[in-house]
Amino acid sequence: MDASAVFPTVPPKAGMYESFYLRAVAPEEPVGAWLRYTVHKRPGEAPKGSLWCTVFDAKRGRPFMHKLTSAALSAPAGGWIAIEQARLGPGHAEGGCGGASWSLKFESDERELRHLGSAWMYRARLPRTKLTSPAPDARFRGTIELPDRGPLALEGWRGMVGHNWGSEHAERWIWLHGIGFAEDESAWLDLALGRIRIAGRRTPWVANGALSLDGRRVRLGGLGRRGLSVSESAEGCELRVPGEGGAVIEARVEVPADSAAGWRYADPDGSGHEVVNCSVAKLELDVTGTGAGAGAGRSLTSAHGGAYELGMRAGERHGVQIAPFADG
């Protein structure tokens, strides 16, 4: 799993953020976890680390949410990030906050997914957010303990491990991840879409990611790719995303009522976003086009294996209660 922390190399005068995160979902019921280990650094200040714990259960309603922020931040040898006693690195995650705790192991047969299509984009000023998935499809085992219910045993849970960093969040973004498709258990989708602001105006949506179907990875989106369409809200979205070789996916996401989490994300300059995330969403895909190979003309359905995140400027209406934790 190729990943390394960026924050230790950032100049003292610069601002930045960084996030290592994982999601895992139960195979038989709409229960899932979303854990984040993040860094926030304002220009000229020392970086701070935060642990974020969100556990979803669509049958119970609002998810469990808590956050801990600390100056005890490091990039340990052999790991990616440490915040107080919490650790995240290749194959393992330990930590706790707000009465919740977790000790997890994960493994993956998939190589890293670098969403941005060219290496130069990871060095350039734009886009200001860089992202990869060290493990776009992962298998988890271990335990999550919650204060209001018994332990969750993650045997057989699938999910992913992601990493992003930058000097500024996108003006508006969507992240979509999918596993647990009834028609192809090995299939997965990992897709990021964003709009940025240049000279006071929002750019059109740009998508980057991949669909793995029948063991074949098809790249989706990219700069200049025509035919992208997006209709999004806190309740879900409908997307049409073109890919390599004429492949096209049409995605429909449905968030179960009252199951989404609402968080505040701060930018290094002091501005902020509000984020709606549901990691137990229903996801339907239609795949067409010759670039999809043998997968063309197929439909895939995951009853609760979708992760849907919508990020927007603070103050926009979305109807999801934001957790009472500051960021930055």
Image (spheres, grey):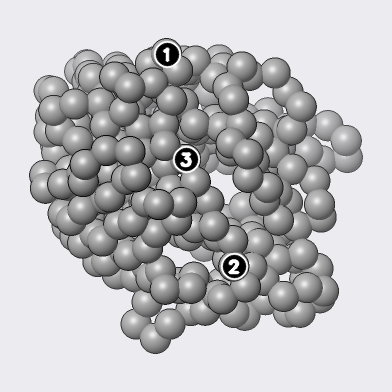
Q: Do callouts 3 and 1 mark residues in contact (Cβ within 8 Å)? A: no
Q: Position of residue 2 (x, y in %)?
A: 35, 69
**First along the sequence among labels 3 and 1:** 3
**First along the sequence among labels 3 and 2:** 3
Residue located beneath label 3 in the image:
65
Disc 2 marks which amino acid? Ser
> In the image, 272: left or right of 193?
right
Labelled disc at residue 278: none
Labelled disc at residue 70: 2
Q: Position of residue 192 (x, y in %)?
A: 49, 39
* Residue in the image at 24% along x and 59% along y: 104
Residue located beneath label 1 in the image:
257
Disc 3, SS: strand
The quadrant in which residue 10 appears is: bottom right
**First along the sequence among labels 1 and 2:** 2
Q: Nearer the viewer, residue 301 or 152?
A: 152
The alpha-carbon separation of the residues under discs 3 and 1 comes to 17 Å
The alpha-carbon separation of the residues under discs 1 and 2 comes to 33 Å
Q: Relative to residue 35, is residue 70 depicted above or below?
A: below
